[in-house]
Amino acid sequence: MLRVFTLSEKSWLGSCLLYKWQKSLGNYLAVAGPDNSVKIFDRHGQKKNELNLPGRCLAMDWDKDGDMLAVIADRSSGIYLWDANVNKSSQLDSGMRDQMSFILWSKIGSLLAVGTSKGNLLIYNQQTSRKIPVLGKHSKKITCGCWSSQNLLALGGEDKVVTISNHEGDTVRQTSVRSDPGDIQFSVMKTDERASPGESTVSVMVGKKTLFLFNLNDPDNPIELAFQQRYGTIIAYRWYGDGYIMIGFSQGYFVVISTHIREIGQELFQAHNHKDSLNSIAISQSLNKAASCGDNCIKIHDLTELKEMYAIVNLDDETKGLDQLSWTDDGQLLAISTQRGTLHVFLTKLPILGDACGTRIAYLTSLLEVTVENHVEGEAPVAVSVEVEPNFIAVGPYHVAVGMNNRAWFYGLGDNGVEKLKDTEYLGTVACMCLNSDYAAALFEGKLQLHMVKNVALIPA
């Protein structure tokens, strides 16, 4: 895995970071430190904007399409929004007088749920600007929650109660747990009868010791799963596949269990992944990979064959230890924050993109890098830093071109190194391009356009 960039700010030093990848697109990374701000970076580590808050950021979440980032802060009852499409921030008056404590966008619509330190709830519809305040949803601070794909909202609070509400805020189910609830998730348990459509199971981490499984269709028979003491406390868990749960424990253990009623709680896989401690786990459904971090290293497994270690990444310079792992939705980038206030981003998937001209080949080696090689002629490889993440590459005897949509960037490959020549716009989205020693031929919308590489004027063929 290739490290793409590292983020480190003076104001972050010595503290853990809160960060969220933009959903769907993964083009932005929002990072909050202890300095009363949220900084927004692009996927190449360039800072794009900064939200200044009245207090430290408590929580944030992107909406399902990645258009809107919502943030709540200490010492404030307001909601802070950043629109990724126009790079503008705004503030929403919650109408509540309490301190905000929880925020989460719906998985399927434009609803935003906001919980408060006194147990009240606000459901805000971004499309219609309608606000639904629900007083007394919990008797104490709302600490965690999750939306289902059917727009049900599960919430947990310091009152040791889990509530399930509809999109209007009406409670449809409620149950008590023995200790503080955390990390609530919706999923589907494996059952013999596949009758219940949708996510009918709510899972809750209780007191960091047990997993509580609450079936909405069988509310009188919840299941509570306990684990071996030597594993330590539960750090995090994730559902994946056909009713499997992956659990990371504080003593470095990494365990997979089934929720099939015949094998409920049965360990299907167990590994002591980290000698001293485990800090976080993450799953990428698109890559079919799982990652855990601890003891200054990241270990990645293939979900189809968990015993096989796909990759190990050591971060020996992180003396204070690692903190949180998070993948972009497409699995292309994996972020790891550290306990000393840095954030590293690794490339875990790269499109296979390249071209050849004679014995020379050019191929994508990082998001913004193309390598040109000619082993037959014995030439040393040349790394070309490019302007954009390309969706096509063309190479000729003396040039390389990269492009996306209707633009292409041309670079000269000379004895003195790489020289950027120009960029060109075409009258349609380029499907492919070929280069010879003097000309570029671009195919778009069934037409072929021919022009000289060094001459900006376009000559229709």
Image (cartoon, rainbow, N blue to C red):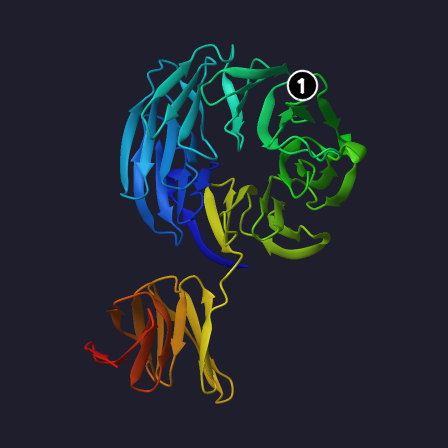
Which residue occupies 55% across, 46% down?
Answer: 319
Which residue occupies 28% across, 42% down?
Answer: 87
Instruction: Decide: few, some or many residues near mark 1? Use Cα within 10 Å; few <14, some 14-19, many ≥20.
Output: some
Which residue reaches farthest right? 262
Which residue reaches farthest left? 457
- Using the rendered image of the protein, determine whether residue 77 is visible from the camera's viewpoint: no
* Tally of numbered tags: 1
Q: Is residue 336 left or right of residue 98?
A: right
* Image quarter of residue 276: top right
The residue that disc 1 covers is 219
Which residue occupies 48% across, 35% down?
Answer: 107
Q: Is residue 69 above or below residue 93?
A: below
Question: In the rendering, at what x and y percent does residue 190 appear?
Answer: 71, 35
Question: In the rendering, at what x and y percent does residue 144 appear?
Answer: 53, 25
Q: Is residue 212 left or right of residue 373?
A: right
Q: Is residue 21 left or right of residue 417?
A: right
Question: In the rendering, at what x and y percent does residue 178 appear?
Answer: 67, 16
Q: Is residue 38 above or below residue 388?
A: above
Which is more toward the observer, 15 or 136? 136
* Image quarter of residue 267: top right
Which is more toward the observer, 375 or 341? 375
Residue type at mark 1?
Pro
Q: Dividing the image into 4 quarters, which one contains the N terminus?
A: bottom right
Which residue reaches farthest bottom? 377
Q: Is residue 255 above or below residue 151?
A: below
Question: In the rendering, at what x and y percent does residue 305 appear?
Answer: 72, 53
Which is more toward the observer, 411 or 457? 457
